[in-house]
Image (tube, helix red, strand yellow):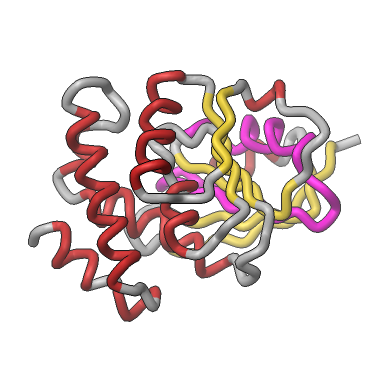
Amino acid sequence: MNNLAGLYGLKKDFNLSDNQIHKYNRFVEFLSVWNSKINIVGKSTLFNPVNSHILDSLQITKFINDAKSKIIDIGTGAGLPGLILSIYKFKNVFLVDSNIKKINFIQHVSKELDLSANIIYSRIEDIKDKKFDYIVSRALANLDKLLSYSSHLSHKNTQMIFLKGKKFQDEINFAKNRWKFKVSAHKSLSDERGRVLIITNLKHND
């Protein structure tokens, strides 16, 4: 299956327009070209990038209702899931990474696809005085570390959406040594072993 066919296969489930599909296809093309020169994503993920990257990121949209929500993608890497959310409909997305090569890629794609993404070249810990409605991430760190990153970026109603693999329950159990939070785990649409974790009410353990 080619990438366009795979993307059109997602059209109904996510109510995608032809323009969105075109932009997702161009994103995959950019990713393939750049990845041949600098290591942005694992090469194995490009065998089926629509599943590995587009669907994996798009599933987050099922948990964000308001298109005006302020969203931060921490450790965005290749712009995943941040750029995918920006293409979808979200206009207030912030993408943060401390790797300048990946930031250059994100800036190039954002300009070429005419996206409104806010791109920040920074360590997550150095972002000050900003709070977000949603904090999203995938393939960055274990849950305990993600919660540590998220704690200073959250307000009382912030929701965290983290894409996790088969050891998600071990990560939840470990994180509870340091944090109090509510969590729900939803089956991943891109990997049957994975889960989408929705976390709210984050507080330090006393």
From this viewpoint, which residue is outermost toward the left? 1
Q: Residue at x 30, y 75 (%)?
A: 11
Q: Residue at x 30, y 32 (%)?
A: 41
Q: Is residue 45 left or right of residue 119?
A: left
Q: Is residue 142 visible?
A: no
Q: Quadrant of the C terminus?
A: top right
Q: Quadrant of the N terminus?
A: bottom left
Q: Is residue 199 visible?
A: yes
Q: Is residue 21 left or right of residue 156?
A: left
| Residue 56 magenta-highlighted | no
Q: Is residue 79 above or below residue 53?
A: above
Q: Is residue 95 left or right of residue 188?
A: right
Residue 77 locus on image (x, y percent): 43, 32
Numbered circles on residues, count: 0
Residue 5 locus on image (x, y percent): 14, 67
Region rendered in magenta: 140-169
Residue 33 locus on image (x, y percent): 18, 33
Among the 4 quarters of the image, the one containing residue 9: bottom left
| Residue 151 magenta-highlighted | yes
Q: Is residue 165 above or below residue 148?
A: below
Q: Residue at x 41, y 60 (%)?
A: 58
Which sits in the foreground, 21 or 192?
21
Q: Is residue 124 above or below residue 29?
A: above
Q: Is residue 12 above or below residue 132?
A: below
From this viewpoint, which residue is outermost toward the right? 206
Q: Residue at x 33, y 55 (%)?
A: 54
Residue 82 locus on image (x, y percent): 49, 47
